[in-house]
Amino acid sequence: MCGIIGYTGNKNALPILIDGLEKLEYRGYDSAGVAVVSGGKIRFKKRKGRIDVLKDSVRSDNLTGTCGIGHTRWATHGEPSDQNSHPHLSLDQRIALVHNGIIENYAKLKDQLKRLGHRFLSDTDTEVLVHLIDHHYSGDMIAAVNQALLEAEGSYAICVLDQNSPDRIICAKKDSPLIIGEGNGEMFIASDIPALLPYTRKVYFLEDGETAIVEKSGAQIFDRYGKRIFRKAYTVDWDISAAEKAGYPHFMLKEIHEGAPALKRTIFPRLKSGRIVFPDLDIKELLCSAQKIFIIACGTAYHAGLTAKYTWEREFKIPIEVDLASEFRYRDPYLSKNTLVILLSQSGETADTLASLRHAKAAGAKTLAITNVVGSSLARLADNVIFTLAGPEISVAASKSYLTQVICLALMLISSSFTGQKLTDAVNFLTALPDLAQLVIKEQDQIKKLAHLYHSKKDIYFIGRGIDHAIALEGALKLKELSYIHADAYAAGELKHGPIALIEDSSLVIALATYPQLFDKIAGNIMETRTRGAKTWVITTKSGYKRFADMSDHITVIEDAPDWAIPILAVIPMQYFAYYACIERGFDVDKPRNLAKSVTVE
């Protein structure tokens, strides 16, 4: 849940390390640090707080060297502090290490090492790992790293510096991502692609259990048994400008505005002669041969998955379960070769989702990944994969990735079950959908005014029925993530079963009303809240405007759309509301407190 950067070459490493850490800020962190080999010694600096604090600290220090590592930490073991920050060093400061993940048996290892005379300076699990490597070191650093990792239980992506090998970094991974980038006489290591884009497009993805020796002349990769692996490089085709703000004040605002182009990139390459085609993948056979389908995800991706349940069960006439990845494998669901498990993750590195994938494969189920990142662990490990083509998403709070996940699920539905005029109508609507989304995007000024009116609320409630409930859940999550307002989403029919007790004079209730079959039902729920003094903001369609205009304090109207497309149009106003509420409250939009973009630990 943090960022790793490494460099070895002929240039001064420090500016590259700092730049890489800044490119990884979106992953979430509370401290940062760097270490370089300089003058035959490891020199380091680490500080609690933002990277700017670290930059101020290193200005007066002589951290010049051509090989180094850097890290941004998101605290798990030990509070955010200078001492708990990475890199961690052996007591003689001969070895430095940065680590993403969790060493689950660190307490046991720490007790053993203490009895051997090791002294610890932090409260972290990571410091145990560098001491363990130091304990096993007898002249061969890679042997010491391998032995330490055999004894460590848990997840890791690590980079190790050794002052006796001043141009070399040893790295290894298990369950946390790590990428090696190849330049011209220089090599890079990172936990995510954006940190490498300014320097190289040629990358190698480490697999679980692999280690690598990285020197400026190249990288040697070894499997868990020490056998050399020769791997073909992957060329990253992302546009570097897509990972920059391009004049926007925040990545979040830029990425909301990129929603329509992201939809085009995801939809149009798959439209062929009035049909939807997934190259090298028979979606119809995959879906229609399944006796049961699980959709597994976390957070925003989970909400995208929920939207499919409402449309897929109706069309396929089989059970569709949408499950949180953090719960899925622990309840030991029944899986068989006739079960299809679909896993959604923007990064493709979400730890719980990857664990669910492994559980499903071990049970013999078929697996399909939907992810935004080519080369990610999820994409490599699943039996089949669909890429959302949203482009880099830097802000911690997801926006365009939600839109593209929803549309990928809709494309799967349409390609598998729609025929005749129904298919023609769906294809026509798909062609128009990006422009319809753009129309919603242009209506941000109204939402900005609402955020100004209601940003001081302590509690805001979202309600909806049917698929609108799934959309409401995402709206509430966005508001919580960005503005820290307590926001809850309820199935509107459940109001009378408890939640209506929360409604009081001047409460704000945001009602999703896009499903014509349930207009009368949701209208009754809206009135229930108004009679108790609530202010209401209704997000509805053109066909719902007359029905709801007189019972709302504020109304936002979107285009009439099929239920498989309505989540895309309906969520954009709520994304804007969360964004502007955050601005009004003076918080950091792109880096919400306590959150990380890619959750790579349980």
Image: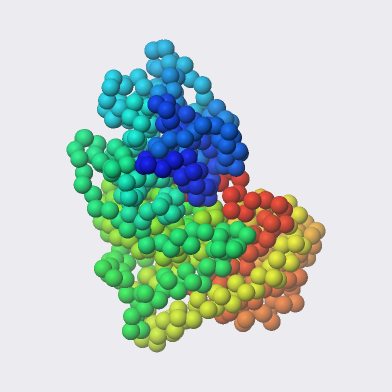
Residue 384 x %, y %: 30, 60
- Which residue does the image show at 42% across and 28% down from the upper left? 39
> Which quadrant is the C terminus positioned in?
top left
Q: Is residue 12 left or right of residue 22?
A: left
Percent position of residue 260, x then y: 51, 72
Q: How is the image coloured?
A: rainbow
Q: Nearer the viewer, residue 24 or 263?
A: 24
Q: As drawn, is 58 to the left or to the right of 427? A: right
Query: 391 or 289, which is in the foreground?
Result: 391
The residue at 36%/84% (across/down) is 274
**Residue 152, percent from left and from top:** 35, 29
Taking the spot 76% from the left edge, 70% from the top edge, the residue there is: 553
Residue occupying image coordinates x 66% and y 63%: 577
Residue 41 rendering spot, x and y as whole percentages: 42, 26
Farthest residue to the left: give it: 227
* Most foreground residue, 303 or 19: 19
